[in-house]
Amino acid sequence: MFTGLIQDVGAVERISSGAMTEVWIASHFPADLQLGESIACDGCCLTVVELKGATFRVQASPETLRHTTLGLWHPGTAVNLERALKVGDRMGGHWVQGHVDAVGEILESRAEAGSWLMAVSLPPQLAAIFIDKGSVALDGISLTVNRVEADRFWVALIPETVARTSLKAKGVGGKVNLEGDLVGKYVARLHGLRSGLTEEQLRAAGF
């Protein structure tokens, strides 16, 4: 489990393809990184299988490649990193599982009054769990959904987010990992919702 608060921006050093894709990522994490621990890499929950100095190796299955942006990575790719939440840690973002739901595309990107606005494509299968002022993990970053439209949603990056993540470097046409809000998923499942949630539907569900 994660919070969506990025702790480091690492860099892909090497990728090896095979039955499992092996990825070596350089980070600035302290020496207490452990074999077997989970790290969210651009929002994908991956397991550390090897450590060598400040570099760690993770593996990705074909399923991960099909449903995330990991297949687009190459040496030099910047990767948002977050270690798993510890019991007693502050919950500064929102509940993030590291289970990517879909890949979105940046449709618009522009500065506005000191912040950076982005419009991201909204896959139809996720529409039911997106609401105005809800939460979304975008490349592992916990963000507030400013506005939901028929085919897209908007988020705003404050200067701190721009400085501490790799997201602003992705321009229009860039691909991003999307993870919808965990609570929204269960509400939508419980009520069999297949389209965007409305305020009336949420009230009826007790929210």
Image (cartoon, helix red, strand yellow):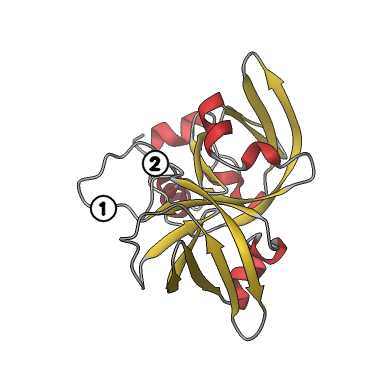
Residue 198 vertical position relative to residue 75 in the rendered view, above or below: above
The kind of secondary structure element at disc 1 is loop
Marks 2 and 1, Cα distance to the nearest angstrom?
14 Å
Looking at this view, name the residue that lies furthest to the left: 88
Q: Where residue 65 sits in the image (x, y, percent)?
A: 64, 69
- Label 2 sits on residue: 94
Residue 114 vertical position relative to residue 206 in the rendered view, above or below: above
Residue 119 falls in image quadrant: top right
Quarter of the figure with the C terminus = top left
Q: Where residue 97 sits in the image (x, y, percent)?
A: 42, 56
- Residue 86's disc is 1
Most foreground residue, 53 or 4: 53
Q: Where residue 23 sits in the image (x, y, percent)?
A: 58, 70
Residue 112 vertical position relative to residue 193 in the rendered view, above or below: above
Q: Is the Cβ of the residue at disc 2 closer than 8 Å to that at disc 1?
A: no
Residue 114 vs residue 9: left or right? Answer: right
Quarter of the figure with the N terminus = bottom left
Q: Disc 2 residue type?
A: His
| Residue drawn where x is 62% and y is 64% of the image | 13
| Residue drawn where x is 67% and y is 80% of the image | 17
